[in-house]
Amino acid sequence: MAKVMIIDDSDAIRMVLKDILVIGQHSLVAELPSGIGALEEYIKSSPDIVLLDMAMPKKDGLAVLKEIMERNPKAKIIMISASDNQETVKDCIGAGASAYILKPFNFQDVLNIINQVAKS
């Protein structure tokens, strides 16, 4: 069971991700509607995995990813995005993301990725 932090500006997506965590018997340790304050909350809650939306107002997921990775190069961050732009995917993986999930996503696929990243 992994401790997970969710950062996504969509209430609906956060709700779906929380349901996936319950099904997979993972625990939610923090939830944020934007990238603002994400690093501070990451430090405070010490999640095993971060589920991070790419496109958010004020501070996007790539900026948050870089901040967290600078603080903890071993952080496990799963990016979630509606964009399949290969440059964006490369940028995220290059910056340290453990995985990249496309929206709309399948419950089981997300749970499998969370489980794989938790074991890595």
Image: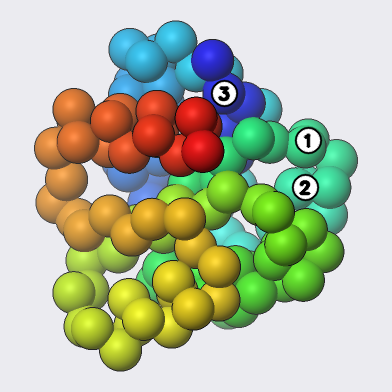
Viewer can see residue 17 = no
Q: Which residue sits furthest front?
A: 120
- In the rendered image, residue 23, in percent from the top left (x then y), is placed at 33, 12
Q: Residue at x 28, y 30 (%)?
A: 112
Q: Which residue is mark 2?
A: 41
Residue annotated with mark 1: 45
Comparing marks 3 and 1, which lies closer to the viewer? Answer: 3
Q: Quadrant location of residue 84?
A: bottom left
Q: Dot 1, crowdedness within 10 Å: few (<14), some or many (≥20)?
A: some
The Cα atoms of the two marked residues, 2 and 1, are separated by 6 Å
Q: Is disc 1 placed on a helix, strand or loop?
A: helix
Tell me which numbered mark, 3 or 1, is placed earlier along the sequence. 3
In primary-sequence order, the first of circles 3 and 2 is 3
Say what secondary structure mark 2 lies in.
Answer: helix
Would you say the residues marked 2 and 1 are in contact, meaning their CB atoms lie under 8 Å apart?
yes
Picture quarter with the N terminus: top right
Which amino acid type is shown beneath numbered disc 2?
A: Glu
Callout 3 secondary element:
loop
- Of residue 98 and residue 67, the one placed in the foreground of this image is 98
Q: Amino acid at mark 3?
A: Ala
Residue 61 badge: none
Q: Quadrant of residue 81?
A: bottom left
Question: Mark 1 belongs to which amino acid?
Answer: Ser
Q: Please state if 78 lies on the left or on the right of 67 as rendered.
A: left
Q: Which mark is residue 2?
A: 3
Residue at (85%, 40%) from the top-left corner?
44
Residue 114: image x %, image y %? Answer: 40, 34
